[in-house]
Structure formats: structure tokens, C-alpha cells
Image (tube, rainbow, N blue to C red):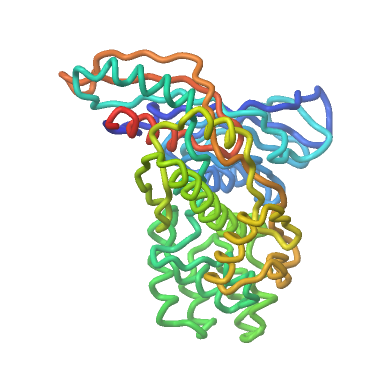
Amino acid sequence: MIFKTRPEDFLVREILKISPHPFGPYALYQVTKRGISTLQAHVRLASALGVRPSAIVFPGLKDKKAVAIQYASLKGKGPEEVRGPGFSAKLAGFFHRHLSPSDIQANEFTLTIRLIPQGLSSALEKALSEVQRSGLPNYFDRQRFISIGPDGQSPGKKILLRDAEGALKVYLTTTFPLDPPSHRAFKEKAKTLWGQWELLLKEAPSPSNYRSVLTYLKDHPTNFRKALNLVTPRVLTLFLSSYQSWLWNKLAGRFLRKRLEGQGVPFSLLEIAGEKLPFYASLPEGLKEELADKTLPFFHHRAAFEEPELLGLAQEILREEGLELRDFKARILSKAYLSRGERKLLLFPSLSAYSIGDDELHPGFLKLELKMLLPPGSYATLVVKAIALKVLD
């Protein structure tokens, strides 16, 4: 079984809770992107509109290897339609403020899974039924962790440790999956030229936020805290939320593992961002009822881990990370913060339609076409992994 053979095999459509108004101080655009990340679409849309990226807000992040239809808000007015490399945007109306993640009601996915061996039709139908009945762990998938380097370095953790230079060093020297070639080349040079800000400024790609940071460091070579706050707030927030999500995965994995082992439920281990997390094929009805509405809090300086078992697991993780809850206030930042709240432990996809037929790209094999609704922040890629696990179970 393979997934995302083509961008068209992964179509996601954002559904908003709010309705655009005919007039207002903020323009709402429906953006269709193909084969580029939301961050890339953000920069390209701003360039096409002739505004700074800070004037635009995308409330949700969508996969790069996909066709995504999502929304963005612009402070001010813009043209009816605008296009650029990998995206197009149409004016959908207006609103009285910028969009926020809480404005997203759901994401509708249309997926195509290919290269399925003949003879697995009944196993697929059984797997689809079981994934709706038992659900799956509601982990953050690897797309969430694009700001964690291949060596596990997290600028978000450095920020919480109040290590401004360390956070900047990760930002300027660690290659991330979405970095274009010019940025990768610059970061390789930054590893050997660290501290030589004038030389690094000459090497920095233009345009890029690196130049703003390095221009400041050239004149204030040791004021790393101020320089860190010159990084785009959206990027700083991404650093923090990525690390916070990674910690939530650890907490959810350990909590779920204790429950599965306690009832003798078999599970496999799925690696996400270097962490091996339990992934079950099926849940007994009693355990499903216990966990179906279970939520776990995000690590935050005001987080309340009320159950003794959960508190023990959280304290264990914090000790391993060398952190305390009071560190989760990001005190060295002025315009980026950690979110509060909680997240459901399990995900129950709402599958609205599916079909099994011949795979036109791979003669002799089957394909599964699937349409479903997922709540904001949940990952269709994990649903695909759950289906594959249940087919092979």
C-alpha cells in the first residue's frame, strides 16, 4: 500500500465555522495550493498582494504533498483573484477580524491509497469498519514536527530553557524538511561562520528573515534575546507548538500504553519524530468506553494534571527533559506564546464514503478512495496508517 503518489491523491478542504460578510476591514481569501507548504503559500500570497507576511493570517497548516483548499485573512482589501507559483486565491468575502484556528470547524479529506494487492477488498472493508468503531490514537503526526531537526534539536525547547543563543543557533544552522536549497546552503555555512555576523549576512538568502536577525547581530553581537525576537512571530509560535505537541505525544503514548498493557490489548509501535508510540488495531468495548472522551492537557505553566497517574507521567517526562511547568511561559519572547488547553486521546474519523476499485496507475492492484471529516488538528495520515495496520492485523 502506498499513499500520496500524486498531490491529487490527498485533497483537503477547510470548513469554517464563520460566514464571510459582504463588507469588513479584513478580506478573506479561499486559497488553493498544490505541492507547496502553507508557510510557502503564505509568503507567496503576501508577495503577490504586495504586503508584508504579517498582514496575512492562515489559521491552519496543511500538508505540502497535497492539494489543499484553505482560508487566509488579509488586513485591508485586495483584488478578486490572485495567482502565484503553486497557488491561487479568490476573495471569499470580509470579516471584522483576522481568522484564528478556532474558526475552523473541520477538515474534509478525499484520499486515494494505491498499490493494494488483489484479494484484500474484504479486509479493507473490515478495517474501515473497525477504524470507525475503535478509533485510533490522536497523535500529532510527523508533519507537525518540521521545526525539529534530524538530530532532535528543538528551538522550542531552547526557548523554554531561556537559551536564546541556542534557539538562534538551531534556527540559523539546522536544516528543516521544508527548507529550500538556498536556505540549506546558507545553514551549512552558518555552522562554520557562527559569530561572524557580517560574513553571515553577506551569505544569507534574500529575501529572508535571516537577514533581519543578522543585521541586528552585526551591530549587537551578543544580544541574542533581542535578535531572537526579530524572528517572525509565526515561526516562533511554530517552534513552541511543535515542541509542545511532541511532549503531548509522549504523554499520550505513555498513558495509552499503560491502559493497553493493563488489559492485555496487543499493539505495535509507531515512530513519530523519534518517539516510539503505541498503536493498537482494535479496542475492547469497555476500554473504548473509558477512553473515547478522554482528554489530556498540553504542557503549559498553568496546566492541571489532576489525576495522580497522569501527574506522575507528566513529572517523569519533565524530569527527562530538564524542565519544570513554570518554564512553559516562554519568558524570553515578547510576541509568541504557548497555547493552553487539552486534546482528545483518541480520534474517531467520520467516514462519509469510500470505494474500492482498480488502480489505474498500477495495473493488477487495487486502490481505495476515501472521503472523511476530521476535527481541526487531527491527521488524515494517521488514519491511513490505522487502516493499513488493521488490514495487516
Residue closest to the eye, 214 or 390? 390
Q: Is residue 201 left or right of residue 363?
A: right
At which x and y percent is residue 176?
Answer: 44, 59
- At 51% from the left and 29% from the top, the residue drawn is 12
Residue 29 found in image quarter: top right
Identify the image quadrant of residue 49.
Answer: top right
Residue 38, horizontal then vertical, whole percent: 54, 43
**Towards the viewer: 311 or 63:** 311
Q: Is residue 379 above or below residue 158?
A: above
Q: Nearer the viewer, residue 295 or 43?
A: 295
- Of residues 182 and 317, the one nearer the viewer is 317
Quarter placement of the C terminus: top left
Relative horizontal placement of residue 173, taking residue 392 as reference (left or right): right
Residue at 54% in and 37% down: 346
Q: Residue furthest front?
A: 263
Q: Name which residue lies at 24% across and 14% down.
A: 358
Q: Position of residue 173 (x, y in %)?
A: 46, 71
* Image quarter (top left, top right, bottom left or bottom right) of the N terminus: top left
- The answer to which quarter of the image holds residue 347 is top right
Q: Say which residue appears at 68% left-offset and 52% top-offset.
A: 307
Where in the figure is residue 236, as x and y percent of width and height?
A: 63, 61
Q: Is residue 251 left or right of residue 28?
A: left
> How many callouts does the rendering have?
0
